[in-house]
Amino acid sequence: MTGFWTEEQVALMESARAFVRAEVAPHLQEWEDAGSVPRDLHAKAAKVGLLGLGIPEELGGAGGTFLDALAVTEAFTEAGASSGLLAALFTSGIALPHIVASGNADLVDRYVRPTLAGEAIGSLAVTEPGGGSDVARIRTTAVRDGDHYVVNGTKTFITSGVRADFVTTAVRTGGPGHAGISLLVIDKGTPGFTVDRSLSKMGWHCSDTAELGFSDARVPVANLVGAENTGFAQIAQAFVVERLALAGHGYGIAARALELTAAYCRERETFGRPLVANQVVRHRLVEMHRRVDAARTYTRAVAARHVAGENPLVEALHAKALAVQAAAYVCDQAVQLHGGAGYLHGTEVERHYRDARILGIGGGATEVLDDLTARLLGYGT
Ligand SMILES: Cc1cc2nc3c(=O)[nH]c(=O)nc-3n(C[C@H](O)[C@H](O)[C@H](O)COP(=O)(O)OP(=O)(O)OC[C@H]3O[C@@H](n4cnc5c(N)ncnc54)[C@H](O)[C@@H]3O)c2cc1C
């Protein structure tokens, strides 16, 4: 072990940082302006073993565990990647886990392997215009007709949905509530499946986000993931990893914003002396550091427990909440201490400030997750 990470993870992080410096950082602003990440970045990342960490090599993954994926998240942000870049490049992390867990060899061959080879892009479509927080109320229907389902409905806010070759889609196959939901993989090009809008956002600019429409789209029954009407349980199964991954985005960009800000405060002079000569500024940097460190240390520990086979539901929720708070505070203070420069497009902390805002909404809004935490802890009525 070298600190928290093993020697192998330290090496993996070094190669991830090198990848970001060579393949990402020089182009990131261009991709932010273009609103998407080029497809060939996926193939490049796959080639150096950065796609599919935590998914067994027999299934086309890069092996290892979720801790390796978290190490890569830290390394990416340290080297100047953004939360939006992580969301776009690693959408496979939310599109594939249900297919992998289903053990369906045909779906693994058609979707998991090509995605982890960087040859295909997948999305996960749960949220609908009528609401995202209450997954149990989704309205998109899939009605069985022979060996197909006929799908009708609309999905929105779908990460990588503009570029996606397939979409793991939550559909209603049964009655109301959780128990009537299934997951279906729907291919781009299926008649009746349309990308209706590319959504423009406050942050995550390089991560394309789509509204998707389904109008009598016929999807083979062979594309059902797991058993019919078990979709909600499958989505819930992936929650711990999804929350820890987003926590990694939060403290990762916060750590980077802190590093940039500390350097700026050493260099920038006001009233004839560097900013760090002011005690109030030093104390602010210390507070930023404390919040990053608390979120990082806590999240790593919870991730280790998850990897060891525990099911740390409450702790993963706390990790996300702590990291969201750290990112919001630290990125805000980073902009403040950069002064006017921090408000300009193209200054890195400005991007992190905007990107941080989604983390308390996506993957479960803070209030909704706090409510779930309260239920798990037995608080409330
Ligand atoms: C950039 C981006 C990328 C996304 N990517 C994906 C994706 O890839 N796939 C996907 O399926 N979805 C995705 N989402 C959707 C995301 O998961 C939802 O936005 C989120 O779950 C919240 O749903 P909503 O926006 O419909 O808000 P609503 O459910 O309408 O809630 C609005 C707000 O009300 C508050 N609130 C809600 N319920 C309660 C309550 N019970 N008590 C107190 N307060 C409450 C919260 O503050 C919440 O933010 C993405 C969203 C964005 C913005």
Image (tube, grey):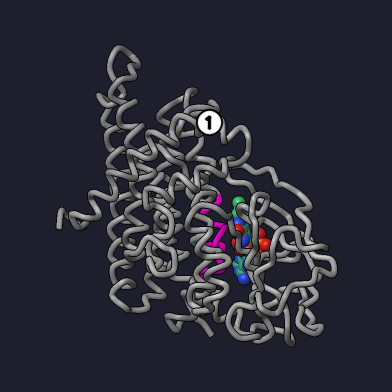
Q: Which residue is mark 1?
A: 29
| Residue positioned 65% across, 56% down in the render | 165
Nearest the viewer among 311 and 369 is 311
Q: Position of residue 339 (x, y in %)?
A: 45, 25
Quadrant of the image occupied by residue 289: top left
* Quarter in which the N terminus is drawn: bottom left
Farthest right residue?
A: 216
At which x and y percent is residue 155?
Answer: 72, 62
**Is residue 256 inside the magenta stretch?**
no
Q: Secondary structure at mark 1?
A: helix
The three-letter amino acid code for the residue at tag 1 is: Gln
Q: How many marks?
A: 1
**Predominant secondary structure, magenta span:** helix
Q: Which residues are magenta?
A: 358-370
Tag 1: Cα neighbours inside 10 Å, few (<14), some, or many (≥20)? some
Residue 86, position as x, y percentages in the image? 47, 49
